[in-house]
Image (cartoon, rainbow, N blue to C red):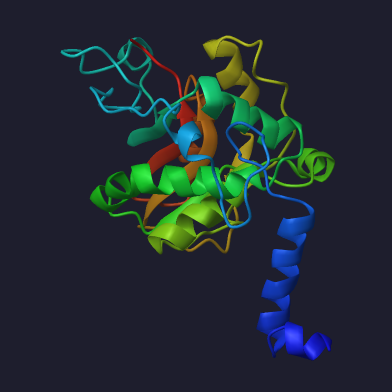
Amino acid sequence: MVSKILPFGEEGRRKAFSLLLDVLYPPRCPLCGEAMPVGQKIHPECIGKIQRITGHRCAKCGKPTDPGERLCSDCAETPHRFNAGFGAFVYDGVIRDAILAMKFRGKKEYADMLGLLTAREAEAFLRMNHTQYLIPVPMHRKKKRMRGFNQAEVLAVRIGQYTGIPVLKDVLVRTRGTAAMKALDTGERRKNLSGAFRVNGRSPIAGKSLCLIDDIYTTGATADACAEACFAAGAARVVIVTVGTGDDR
């Protein structure tokens, strides 16, 4: 009887099982957290609540700025190490809530849709910078073990699937744990991250154009520390793409 209901083959059984799980445990919208109909990934009305960045951007980090301002206030004062940055959305509202749920409430599945939304916004930026590899910002192994996953890695994989750009998961590593960044000012963040990243000796990045992937861009301290390690290993160009970014307007 079961064989008449389920499609034949391993792939068919896998899809049927996945469908059954969606019926028993409906997926939740990554932006509002409410249950969704089977087959739906995000509530259409929630899409309209996302703060897309359609106006002027900082020429360095990509934060939204007022027209006529080439650089945001931070980039005007700080000589960032990375070449360019792009934040898909303003880090506020439903995007902020979704990122926090992903990171601190174990909602790993939210990364799938956040990665897809980010890939759609950032694809032109990635092509313009001739990106050859995506590199997730690494998490220290102890923190990754506690959280269960590195959200930057999950996002990078999804963006790679959408754009076709290969992901290098283990090239950039975090050599030590660092203090929480939230309460630190810019100078303290940079000191906190100094020497915290390195590139594995077997890395294929020499002479390549890379894009770092992370969830949030704030002061750029993490991006700079990662870019420094990549340049030391011979990278030709390093840019960064994040789901959320600050707003300098």
Is 113 on the left-hand or right-hand side of 47? Answer: right
Pick the residue in front: 90 or 175. 90
Q: The C terminus appears in which quarter of the rendering? A: top left
Is residue 82 visible in the rendered image? The answer is no
Q: Where is residue 26 in the image (x, y as percent from the top left)?
A: 72, 50
Q: Where's residue 142, x and y in %?
A: 82, 41
Pick the quarter of the image with the N terminus: bottom right
Q: Which of 220 and 99 is in front in this view?
A: 99
| Residue 10: % across, % down | 71, 85
Q: Which residue is drawn at 70% across and 41% down?
A: 175
Q: Is 76 situated above or below 27?
A: above
- The reply to whether residue 228 is in sight is yes
170 to 68, vertically: above or below: below
Q: Residue at x 38, y 13 (%)?
A: 74
Q: Is residue 22 above or below residue 151?
A: below
Query: How many numbered marks have been drawn onto this rendered protein structure?
Result: 0
| Residue 7 sits above or below residue 135 on the image | below
Report the side of 128 relative to 2 (left or right). Answer: left
Most distant residue in the left direction: 68
Q: Residue 52 location in percent, x, y?
A: 36, 29
Q: Residue at x 78, y 90 (%)?
A: 3
Residue 241 falls in which quadrant of the image? top left
In the image, is 133 to the left or to the right of 151?
A: left
Which quadrant of the view contains residue 105?
Answer: top right
